[in-house]
Image (tube, rainbow, N blue to C red):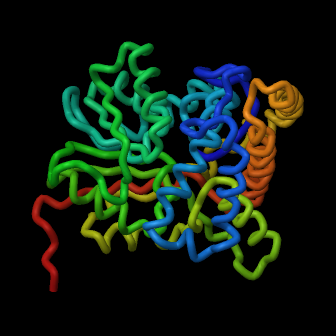
Amino acid sequence: MRVYSSCPAEQKGKRAVDLSGGSISSEKVRDNYNQYWSFFRQPKEIETAEKVPDFVDTFYNLVTDIYEWGWGQSFHFSPSIRGKSHRDATRLHEEMAVDLIEVKPGDRVLDVGCGVGGPMRAIAAHSRANVVGITINEYQVNRARLHNKKAGLDSLCEVVCGNFLEMPFKDNSFDGAYSIEATCHAPKLEDVYGEVYRVLKPGSLYVSYEWVTTDKYRADNPEHVEVIQGIERGDALPGLRSYKDIAEIAKKVGFEVVKEKDLALPPALPWWTRLKMGRIAYWRNHVLVTVLAAIGIAPKGTVDVHDMLFKTADYLTRGGDSGIFSPMHMILLRKPQVPPSKS
């Protein structure tokens, strides 16, 4: 998930005075923020697989601490549930993913784009499967390992630094896989789906929660275009895909489509409620970040990053309110026991 709100986080791992630029030295945070925006001044640069890893890595160095401080350890959305806290709603959304792929205790499961490991820990605790997460960002690897150890789940959770477009795993080596709002960073979805297909054992299931434009999106509507471009620029996305494309891409790489559903549709309650609730807290936190940066405790560019994420939260809210965007288009896929013939 690539968003920011200042609601109380489920499991906070950061304090404001500890905000950093991830693996970026403090004095270079502002330079890297400017470098991040330079990708959008050269749109062709973010359309190639060669450029995207650096683009995404830079983004997560800039935002990881702010996400943890302002949102929690699970960098994604979930539908609001009446009578349930944000923490419980998040956990249930994560547990549903592993329930869908039908893994057993001791199975080896892949988390494709694991962030700092919030979902990984919830899924390992729920399923008792051995979860292996991959993230492009070295700082997130270190944060995830720290959290895994603190949670007493390091025996079930392993974290690898790598590119999910070229994963360092053997063919047919996982009993299941999931991705929660992560594959949106891939310039071509078939590349990451192809890698997941390769490493899954035949007969195994893969579920992904995808960021998509919905059937309500109109490319000739300037406001729609503004909202989607705002989401892309504030969340390190090479380009949002249409919901119509997901299943076709999956079938193209060899998967069988078991189920497809937009989990944001009614009767689900709005996933963006939490963003709206965080607006007042944002201004309080923005003052705090500004003061900390002014006195040299937080890196100078932190104020710019914080402001960018708040503006992005507004675009996400508008996308949710209008129904043109969903961050939880669920697709459940199976790798066939026998590979499809190539005719």
Name the residue rendered at 31%, 46% in the picture.
177
- Residue 291's x, y, as percent? 87, 27
Q: Quadrant of residue 262?
A: bottom right
Name the quadrant of the N terminus: top right
Name the residue rendered at 32%, 27% in the picture.
157
Counting every numbered tag in the picture gives 0
Q: Quadrant of residue 323?
A: bottom right
Name the quadrant of the C terminus: bottom left
- Residue 151's x, y, as percent? 43, 15
Residue at far bottom of view: 343
Q: Quadrant of residue 218?
A: bottom right
Above or below, comparing residue 107 to residue 316 in the picture: above
Residue at far front of view: 27
- Residue 126's x, y, as percent? 36, 24
**Is residue 99 among the parts visible in the rendering?**
no
Front residue of this view, candidates 49 and 261:
49
Name the residue rendered at 57%, 30% in the picture.
89
Left or right side of 204 for 28: right
Residue at far left of view: 338
Front residue of this view, candidates 269 and 67:
67
**Is residue 119 among the parts visible in the rendering?**
yes
Left or right side of 315 for 26: left
Name the residue rendered at 73%, 34% in the picture.
299
Front residue of this view, candidates 197 and 302:
302
